[in-house]
Amino acid sequence: MKINDVHYRSIALNDDGWSVRIFDQRKLPWELVFVHLETMEQAAKAISEMWTRGAPMIAATAAYGFCLALRKDTSDENLESAYQTLLATRPTAVNLRWALDEMKAATLEHEGQARIEAAYKRACEICDEDVEINRKIGENGLKILRKLSKEKNGEPINILTHCNAGWLATVDYGTITAPIYLAHDEGIKVHVWVGETRPRNQGASLTAYELSQHGVPHTVIADNAGGLLMERGEVDLCLVGTDRVTRNGDVCNKIGTYLKALAAKDNDVPFYIALPYPTIDYSMESGDMVPIEERSEQEVTRIAGMSDQGDVMEVQITQSRAYNPAFDVTPARLVSGYITERGVLEKVCDGDSDEPVYAEIAA
Ligand code: MRU
């Protein structure tokens, strides 16, 4: 992803070879602020307070947080304590547990300096793998966008998205944005309806920022506008990310995704999920078992923005109490398909086996 024509990954090792650079996503789109993580505690805070966010980025940050913990103390006790601390930062995205399990498996057999080296090696691989996964999701999703463009005789395809499953939520490219960038770059006319995604506005602040940087035409809409646009035939495809897909294909994603899926079903709008394989939780049967994170009510009662004087500030929008579940579950029956790095799936698994059922995408 490029910002002002400079290529960045959302997370990277600094030149010292051990500290970690992320963006403070709370400051976007107003300011581009780099954060340098030097301790596991800082990495844990960056995840739980959402300086960084999005399932694959949570996983990547936790992987490096694990390295930072071992750098301080390579003992088994510290390894286990780092695993537990990082795991507790956010409950919903299964990628977090996946990455921590990977880190544990890569380091347990080593001791001392070799343990630190093994940790950094695996964390770097996790990041590189994520980039490759998103690139392939892009290629697989592009087939769907090409087909839609053909059906519309080259007229712009209108894609509705929710939250941010873009570059900032992954190490590079983004899950839903990878196919959009590829389509845009090859001359397919694309327009994105960006749902603002209250309460934290990841759509309005982050997805819109990313699409602007890549020059992709887009329009921010209030979350509640999605249904009307679908009724009017102004949405050709809904494309969202996910924090966890269960064996039966239920999709846990940012609160509000379910309402979009209901409106899509009622209006025959295809509803696709773009996800890396580590987001599929084969150990969980259905979506009602996914732990739904509840966040601070202040995320609902307050809102951040820039004043006419150019000051970034928060204001209060209600004096009442608020309730803030951060995710919801879209049942598999509302999902048209799952765009993964391995291909587009009709189902994430077939009966008792963990083998997916692939969808036919006509060229
Ligand atoms: O609470 P967030 O901002 O971390 O929620 C992020 C989402 O819901 C994304 O859609 C999901 O993590 C997929 S990111 C590729």
Image (spheres, helix red, strand yellow):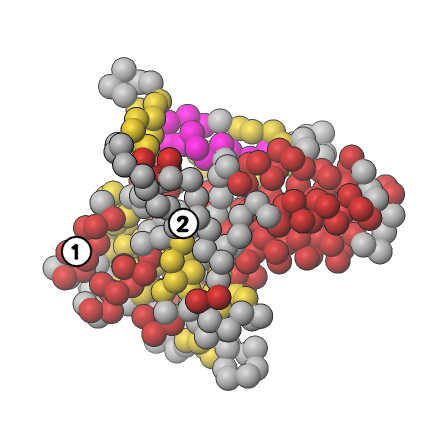
Q: What residue do we see at 32% from left, 42% from top?
A: 322
Q: What residue do we see at 38% from left, 72% from top?
A: 332
Which class describes the residues within 10 Å of circle 2: few (<14), some (14-19), or many (20+)? some
| Quadrant showing the C terminus | bottom left
Viewed as shown, does residue 2 lie left or right of 266?
right
As helix, strand or loop, the secondary structure at mark 1 comes to helix
Q: Amino acid at mark 1?
A: Leu
Q: What residue do we see at 36% from left, 53% from top?
A: 255
Question: Is the shortest distance between ligand 1 and the CB of mark 1 under 8 Å?
Answer: no
Q: Amino acid at mark 2?
A: Ala
Does 256 sit above or below residue 150?
above
Question: Is the shortest distance between ligand 1 and the CB of mark 2 under 8 Å?
Answer: yes
Residues in magenta? 21-32
Q: Earlier in the sequence, mark 2 or mark 1?
A: 1
Which residue is label 2 attached to? 326
Which residue is label 1 attached to? 229
As helix, strand or loop, the secondary structure at mark 2 comes to loop
Q: Nearer the viewer, mark 2 or mark 1?
A: 2
Prevailing secondary structure class for the magenta stretch in the rendered image:
loop
